[in-house]
Image: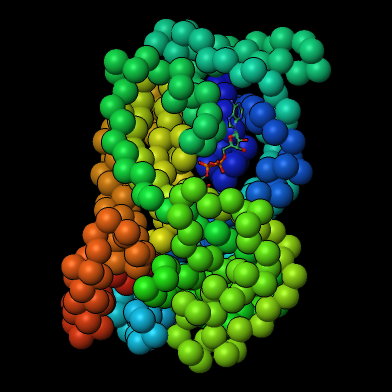
Amino acid sequence: MRTNVVIVGAGPAGLMLGRLLDLAGIDNLILERRSAEYVLGRIRAGVLEPGSVALMERARVSGRLRAEGLVHEGAVLSFDGDSHRLDFTALVGRQVTVYGQTEVTHDLMAAREGQTIYEAENVELHDFAGKPQVTWRKDGVVHRMDCDYIAGCDGYHGVSRASVPAAVLAIFERIYPFGWLGLLVDRPPVAEELIYAHHARGFALCSQRSLSRSRYYVQVPASEKVEAWSDDRFWDELRRRLPQAAAEALRTGPSLEKSIAPLRSFVAEPLRFGRLFLAGDAAHIVPPTGAKGLNLAMSDVAMLADALIEFYAEKSAAGLEHYSARALARIWKAERFSWWMTSLMHVFPETGAFGRRIQRAEFDYLTSSTAAQQSLAENYTGLPD
Ligand code: APR
Ligand code: PHB
């Protein structure tokens, strides 16, 4: 069997790439290790930059996003209870849209025309420097697909990056000594806009999925176990870290989901190895503070899709040759912003009282400088390619 492009992974990166290739008439196969239900059950990010919204539009899957997505014109930052609203529209003339990654995945799955094989076990990549092939096992039978290109969209723990010889792969990484404990609840959000709160006890975030469903997070040590956190303990800790008005307005309820995610900054370079390309979490991880993970996955695959479309339409490999450098330039800017916002908003045990004074000075500078606020808003709402 033969196809143009084998895509490994049916997360948002793989599904969006598959959709863009389908629309361009480029034959592709998606191989996903998990079931579709499992993929849809994962609770992930929820803030889309205008560029990601535009890509959903281009992919003709923006109907529900336009109807149900919540357009946010700003967000609130607080430090030890002092709050400041950033007005994205006034600062940079752009907004973000709150729409869960689960919904993005759902819309892309529903629109899928090409073949997707779920529960594909033991996916292996072969000869991507020459004549690429991918093999997998399904229901005990081993299958093989020959292709022109392989797109590794299989996330941080995927097989694609792991298949690249260590000698040609450069890894840049920073692991933070904490994670985010997240809770999803069917209660209206505490405020219209997101609240990012720095507190001596640690960071807290009030986010949302809809007008009736909220997502909250608190910073916890990396070693923390989710079993140690009853819902009551979570709500008590969250309230302590929020500005008073928000703490009083908080509507609590039984958790629909509760989990801990470690925080990490990670980039693999380059993104091309012969006929294998990496995109999304397979190539890079950002800490969630700047809400960049999903948006970066979207911009990677937009660039990769354009390069592949150019190759098949015009027989020009120029776009494919530039993909790695072009995507990495954008990735590193998002890595910088996510690292910076993480550094400002979290408590770092090792930096002590000096570190907190510096963070406070940064917050005070930010709230008093339109230039600094514009810089934040420009990055948060998404830099151009
Ligand atoms: N074979 C096949 N599929 C695999 C394999 C494998 N060996 N390993 C992983 N996968 C699948 C996973 O099950 C998952 O469905 O690849 C998919 C990767 O999806 P994501 O992890 O969601 O990554 P990506 O599509 O790049 O999306 C990035 O996810 O967590 C967020 O912050 C991140 O929002 C960003 C987005
Ligand atoms: C979320 O809603 O899950 C979310 C929102 C903003 C972030 C991170 C996560 O910065």
The quarter in which the N terminus is drawn is top right
Ligand 1's quadrant is: top right
Report the front residue among 193 and 20.
Answer: 193
Q: Which residue is at a point 35% across and 64% down the rendered structure image?
A: 347
- The location of residue 270, given as percent across then percent down, is 30, 29
Vertical order, 244 against 331 (above or below): below
Q: Is residue 378 visible?
A: no
Left or right, 285 with respect to 217, comes to left
- The location of residue 234, given as percent across then percent down, is 60, 69
Vertical order, 292 against 204 (above or below): above
Report the front residue among 241 and 313.
Answer: 241
Q: Which residue is at a point 34% across and 32% down the rendered structure image?
A: 268
Vertical order, 248 against 275 (above or below): below
- The location of residue 91, given as percent across then percent down, is 29, 80
Q: Quadrant of residue 360?
A: bottom left
Report the front residue among 360 and 58.
Answer: 360
- The location of residue 105, given as percent across then percent down, is 64, 50
Q: Quadrant of residue 117?
A: top right
Q: Which residue is at a point 52% across and 86% down the rendered structure image?
A: 246
Q: Quadrant of residue 123?
A: top right
Q: How many marks?
A: 0
Q: Is residue 34 visible?
A: yes
Q: Which residue is at a point 62% across and 13% down the rendered structure image?
A: 135
